[in-house]
Image (cartoon, rainbow, N blue to C red):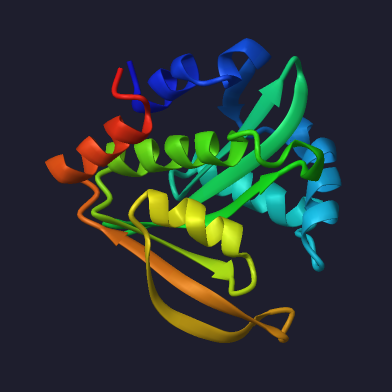
Amino acid sequence: MSIASRFLRSSSQESHGLSIEPMRRRHLGDILKIEEQVYPKPWTSGVFSSEIDLVRRGERFYIVAKEKNQLVGYAGLMFVVDEAHISNIAVDPQRRREGIGKYLLFHLIEQAIARGAQALTLEVRASNTSAHALYRIFGFAPAGIRQRYYENTEDALVMWVHDIQSAEYRLRLNTLGGGQ
């Protein structure tokens, strides 16, 4: 059983019927609704369609979180040599603080490990302190700043976690997943 599955089983998400499935074109309408609520310059349907095409080529990994057939979040990874880059994690603003983002992040990390990635990286808005805290729980540490990265106005904090194949990192994930 995967760490994310153990997390799901040990969390309140199980009682809510939260499930994860691969992102498909049929999800784009719901994804775009969330995208428009959470980002000042949202990705377009065309961008997501291109990313889904890259999934088929093994260059990306995208998932959606659903509760009772309602899409409540989505997330993605890009693979580059022996690293994985988290391209996005978004949760319906009405559903924040329920552990959905954490659950999506578990799945991304598991996929990165399964694909042999040695490290994970991401950019996050400098002002998004709640996301910083979530990423730190998973071992991400600040590594730099990309000035004016978002909409050419807001800085991005670049964060990394290394050695995700190590026994120590797997122990961290097991601890976060309830250790079951």
Provide residue 15's location: percent of width, then percent of height.
62, 11
Q: Is residue 78 visible?
A: no
Count of residue discs: 0
- Position of residue 71 relative to residue 32, above or below, is above
Residue 128: horizontal and vertical position, in percent?
63, 65
Q: Residue 130 appears at what percent x and percent y?
A: 59, 57
Name the residue nearer the viewer: 134 or 59: 134
Left/right of residue 25 with respect to residue 36 in the rendered view: left
Q: Is residue 100 visible?
A: yes
At a point 70% along the width and 41% down the height, the residue shown is 96
Question: In which image quadrant can residue 16 be found?
Answer: top right
Find residue 71 and report its horizontal and vertical position in percent.
Answer: 75, 29
Q: Residue at x 79, y 61 (%)?
A: 42
- Among all residues in the image, which is located at the extreme left? 167
Q: Nearer the viewer, residue 145 or 10?
A: 10
Which quadrant of the figure contains the N terminus? Answer: top left
Is 161 above or below relative to 19? Answer: below
Residue at image position (29%, 33%) is 175
Q: Is residue 10 left or right of residue 127?
A: left
Q: Quadrant of residue 170?
A: top left
Left or right for 125, reference 96:
left
